[in-house]
Image (cartoon, helix red, strand yellow):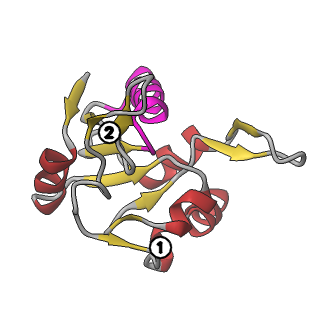
Amino acid sequence: MKHVSVTEAHQLQAAGSTYVDVRSTQEFEAGHPAGAVNIPLLEPDDRGQMAQNPDFLRVMKATFPAGAPLLVGCQAGMRSLKAAQMLETFGFTDVTNVRGGFGGARDQMGTLVEPGWHTAGLPIETDAAPEHTYDALLEKADKA
């Protein structure tokens, strides 16, 4: 599995890789890397508890070919690592985990140990192109 910093991810995104933000739709809407696509690994259930998104792989497969260059990011790097491993297991061949995610990884003392997209000052947005939202991608997968 490949791992890159947010700065390296930004360069790869500029060169044509797609940043897949696997945070919840609410986290994505609050701010995300500019140009990112949202396909959450976890979403709140009916009780508000975070639960596995049962459509994650189906939407990924409907949205991207197996060889598409994908940058997988979350808030701090743990969900993205799990999602990237899952994608590789299910046939995606060019998957890169983004260390530090959007907000940065911290140690047990709260010290920033890996800058995130936001903390590194990289371009962010709160609005997304309609085709980059999870609702649109889920709808597209449902029609496939």
Q: Quadrant of residue 10?
A: bottom left
User: Would residue 28 be counted in the magenta stretch?
Assistant: no
**Quarter of the figure with the C terminus:** bottom right
Q: Residue furthest front?
A: 109
The type of residue carrying mark 1 is: Glu
- 89 or 78: nearer the eye? 78
Which numbered disc flags the more N-terminal residue, 2 or 1?
A: 2
- Circles 2 and 1, Cβ within 8 Å, touching? The answer is no
Position in image of residue 114 (x %, y %) = 26, 35
Local packing at callout 1 (Cα closer than 10 Å; few below 14, some 14-19, many 20+) is: few
**Magenta part of the chain:** 74-92
Residue 77 or residue 15, whichever sits in front: 77
Element at label 2: loop
Image spot of residue 101 (x, y percent): 36, 44
Q: Provide residue 50's location: percent of width, then percent of height.
A: 72, 39
Q: Which label is found at residue 131?
A: 1
- Looking at the image, residue 5 sits to the left or right of residue 88; the answer is left
Mark 2: give few (<14), some (14-19) or many (20+) Cα within 10 Å. Answer: many
Asked whether residue 144 is in view, the answer is no
| Residue at the far right in the pictured view | 47
Residue at position x 55%, y 62% in the image: 137
Q: Nearer the viewer, residue 35 or 58?
A: 35
Q: Residue at x 43, y 78 (%)?
A: 129
Relative height, residue 46 to residue 131 (above, below): above
- The image position of residue 48, as x and y in percent, is 82, 47
Q: Which disc is residue 100 wearing?
A: 2
